[in-house]
Image (tube, grey):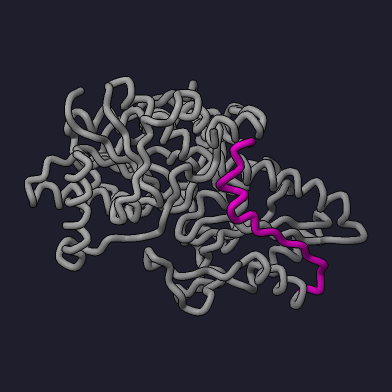
Amino acid sequence: MGKGTLLYAQSGGVTAVINATAGAVIQAARARKVKVLAARNGILGALREDLVDTSKESAAAIRGLAHTPGGAFGSCRYKLKSLEQDQSKYQRLLDVFDAHDVRWFLYNGGNDSADTALKLSKMAAATGYPLTCIGVPKTVDNDLVVTDCCPGFGSAAKYTAVSVAEAALDVAAMADTSTKVFVYEVMGRHAGWLAAAGGLAGTGKDDAPQVILFPEIAYDEAKFLARVQETVKRVGWCVVVVSEGIRHADGRFVADAGGGKDAFGHSQLGGVGPLLAATVKDKLGLKVHWTVPDYLQRSARHLASKTDLAHAQAVGKAAVEYALKGMNGVMPVIVRTSQKPYRWKVEPAALERIANHERPCPRVSSTNPATASPPPAGPTWNPMVRGEAPPPTARTACRATCG
């Protein structure tokens, strides 16, 4: 393709398939004879000039990325400020890009990462440096606007639905003499997509989860406890799925961990699952168990959705194509073209439309009760979790990625 290097980086919380996107980026670039560098730990690697030359990796190692969870090149939570506020850092990035002949930058992440890619695209335009910036979608929260779904969500949703269904069988078996209520906490600071995905575990009124709490709906303790008590009386037990980001009516996070902020400026949340479990035990006197799957829900590559894997690889390939065409400041997004049968395609969308915007879970509004039943998940979502994509054995995967 000629002179120039492509720089790829991962940002934010990783997913079960973000490395599949990385592998697709590298493979697509190799096919066009473009050298790919990867920044260690996201944009920090670029600032530190800590770059991995992927051309030294074998084809087998790159293929192995498709089977590996986590972030192969490391990720970070680091948000650049405006061009004026962080001028020295932007100049540092320009110097590093110029030193390594970087002409294309692909940033694989969520809302804040899209913002970084957008700022860098503006920086390049303002300085005249020949750089094309592409945002590459990824997030288990599924809260990016424009795109039909986000790579990473389908696999996390599948893990959630399977785990809730299996745990419910356990609770039902023990409820007569033991646990009456089980609380399952999922990720989702502002959008309840993963919480709603728990609803895929059941179809009937009495199927688990009988209670789902969303960040889009103000938490009402009295209504919550009444719903749990009524369910236990009727069914004999109750499974609760709760989003980490549920809030009180005044906007405070129920699980706010004392006002701390992460590197993106987000409130540090303390763990709403054990908090609700304690509330049920203290106020209703019922035996409760709880779980916070935390990283497990986003790293469970063994349960990855085949559709999700295909999405992840497709956006990686498209990102390279857009970059080499000079389509600065865009992101490849998933567009659903048919529900039955499920069909989709990838199209470019302007980062201006995506950066710093969040998409709440549909069919969840203030008109709903404090707990939603039936959960807002169904046929529209089924393709997201559809299909099996089993990885090779752990030893094979390790050999392919670790050498």
Report which quarter residue 239 is drawn in. Answer: bottom right
Magenta region includes residue 57: no
The residue at 65%/67% (across/down) is: 224
**Residue 126 at least partly seen:** yes
Task: Indicate left or right for 18 with 114 as reference.
Answer: right
Residue 157 versus residue 93 in the image, above or below: above
**Residue 336 at least partly seen:** no
Task: Give the x, y percent position of residue 114.
Answer: 30, 49
Task: Give the x, y percent position of residue 308.
Answer: 50, 33
Report which quarter residue 250 is drawn in. Answer: bottom left
Magenta region includes residue 294: yes
Task: Indicate left or right for 178 with 250 as reference.
Answer: right
Residue 219 versus residue 328 in the image, above or below: below
Residue range corresponding to the magenta coloring: 284-302
Q: Quadrant of the N terminus?
A: top left
Residue 140 versus residue 44 in the image, above or below: above
Report which quarter residue 278 is drawn in. Answer: bottom right
Q: Quadrant of the C terminus?
A: top right
Task: Indicate left or right for 337 with 310 as reference.
Answer: left
Q: Count the labels in the image.
A: 0
